[in-house]
Image: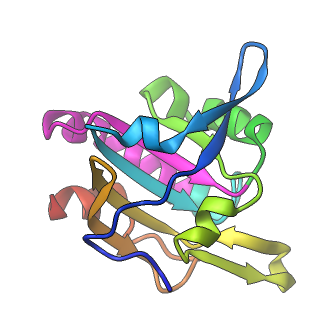
Amino acid sequence: MSITVGDKLPGATLLHLGAEGPEAVSLGDKLAGRKVVIFAVPGAYTGVCTTAHVPSFIRTKPKFDAKGVDEIICLAVNDPFVMKAWGESTGAAAAGITMLADAESAFTTAIGMDFSAPPAGLINRSARYAMLVEDGVVKVLHREESPGTCEASGGESLLAAI
């Protein structure tokens, strides 16, 4: 069952590539007492994720900042090496967007946002969504019906909802 508005996100350990290599990141620590946007993509370097989803949050980041959002996190079922390189190549890292890896799909599966599309080589990946989370509780959640579209989950759509 998928997470819904009003639910508290489960604890999760995600990965970030630091100066010394992969580092564990406690999602609970990132969310505690903070207003955070999390958007998830089916895969780094894939078409819509790279050309539409990430750019929508780069464009809108200053407006989220103005609304009191403490951090924007991009999440994908990829490894932290890929997430770091993708964040650099898209300009997301330079824009201040945090790129985190859910390498084993543990968080994605726990919140019911996992899917597989074997013909595309996407196994146990994340659905495309965006959410506003306050102190660990989902306040707004926009999930795309199809992983190949970025409308409801784009930065502008989420911004308009908050």
Q: Residue at x 46, y 47 (%)?
A: 55
Magenta span contains residue 155? no
Q: Position of residue 15 (x, y in %)?
A: 68, 38
Image position, residue 26 (x, y; %): 55, 38
Residue stretch rendered in magenta on the structure: 51-77
Task: Say which quarter of the image contains residue 89.
Answer: top right
In the displayed structure, 70 sits above or below 149; it is: above
Q: Horizontal and vertical percent for residue 14? A: 63, 44
Query: Is 108 located above or below residue 51 in the figure?
Result: below
Q: Is residue 5 left or right of residue 19?
A: left
Q: Position of residue 142 (x, y in %)?
A: 35, 72
Does 9 sit left or right of 146 as displayed? left
Quadrant where the image shows the C terminus? bottom left
Q: Write the residue at 23% across / 41% down.
A: 64
Image-based side of 43 in relation to 53, left or right: right
Q: Quadrant of residue 69?
A: top left
Q: Residue at x 16, y 36 (%)?
A: 68
Quarter of the view holding residue 43 = bottom right
Q: Nearer the viewer, residue 98 or 15?
A: 15
